[in-house]
Amino acid sequence: MEQVGYHKRDIMVDRVEDAKESQQDAQEEFTSALEALSALTNFDGGELESVYNNINDKYEDSEKAAQEVRDRIAAIEDVSDALFDEWQGELDLYTSAKLRRSSEQKLRETKASYKTMLSAMKRAEDKMTPVLNTLRDNTLYLKHNLNASAIGSLKGEFSSLEKDIQYAIKQMNAAIAESDKFLQQLNQK
């Protein structure tokens, strides 16, 4: 995991920043999918298959973005476990009790901040799955029923999906804010 001149702490900072970017990308993809479905609810004739293809593309992009968020969170967990284990193990190497206590305190504070950030990320991640499921259901329904009555059926789902996406985005914003706080704290050390 560590490379010469590149410590676990630096790797963790990079991974948190990457996760933050992934969450921002996921927000954009979810918003884009919502806009595509919104356009569908206002559909007034024309080539329904091209509308379906656009919605399906947006769903697939949203799925990829959500998977990227999941992967980034897993990468953060991987490096944080190694970082905290190493830090804990090195506390015994101190000969100065004062410095050891100070390092132990910083470790506790960093772990607490990390747990808060990770919890926010996990909450945002958990909100993505139901939204993706609804997007997939609507996309499949439209695919199997490429006609005007299918659009009418999806209009009822749209307002619920819109609320779900807005809530997921709110959770992602909270996770991004926690990431920023964690990075700020980590960079002060």
Image (cartoon, rainbow, N blue to C red):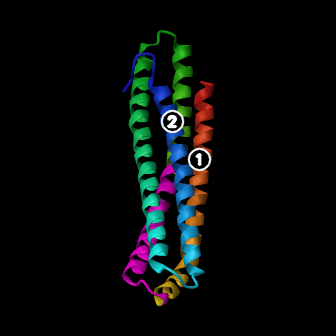
Residue at 62% x, 46% y is: 177
Residue range of the region highlighted in magenta in the rendering: 121-148
State yes or no: discs 1 and 2 in contact (Cβ < 8 Å): no
* Residue 126 among those drawn in magenta: yes
| Disc 2 element | helix
In the rendered image, residue 132 lying in the magenta stretch gets the answer yes
Question: Residue 107 appears at what percent x and percent y?
Answer: 51, 28
Q: Main secondary structure of the magenta part?
A: helix
Q: Answer above or below: position of 172 versus 40.
A: above
Taking the spot 48% from the left edge, 69% from the top edge, the residue there is 55
The front one of 12 and 140 is: 140
**Residue in the image at 58% along x and 85% along y:** 44
Toward the bottom, the furthest residue is 149
Relative horizontal placement of residue 174, taking residue 68 as reference (left or right)? right
What amino acid type should be assigned to the residue bearing mark 2? Lys
- Which residue is at the front of the view, 151 or 176? 151
Q: Quadrant of the C terminus?
A: top right
Amino acid under disc 1: Ile
Of 83 and 70, the residue lying toward us: 70
Work out whether mark 1 precedes mark 2 in sequence or the reverse, and give the earlier one.
2
144 shown above or below 133: below
Image quadrant in which you'd find residue 4 = top left
* Marking on residue 111: 2
Q: Nearer the viewer, mark 1 or mark 2?
A: 1
Label 1: few (<14), some (14–19) or many (≥20) C-alpha neighbours in 10 Å = many
Image location (x, y in percent) of residue 19: 50, 43
Which residue does the numbered mark 1 point to in the structure image?
176
Q: What is the spatial separation of the Cα atoms under label 1 and label 2, in whole angstroms?
A: 18 Å
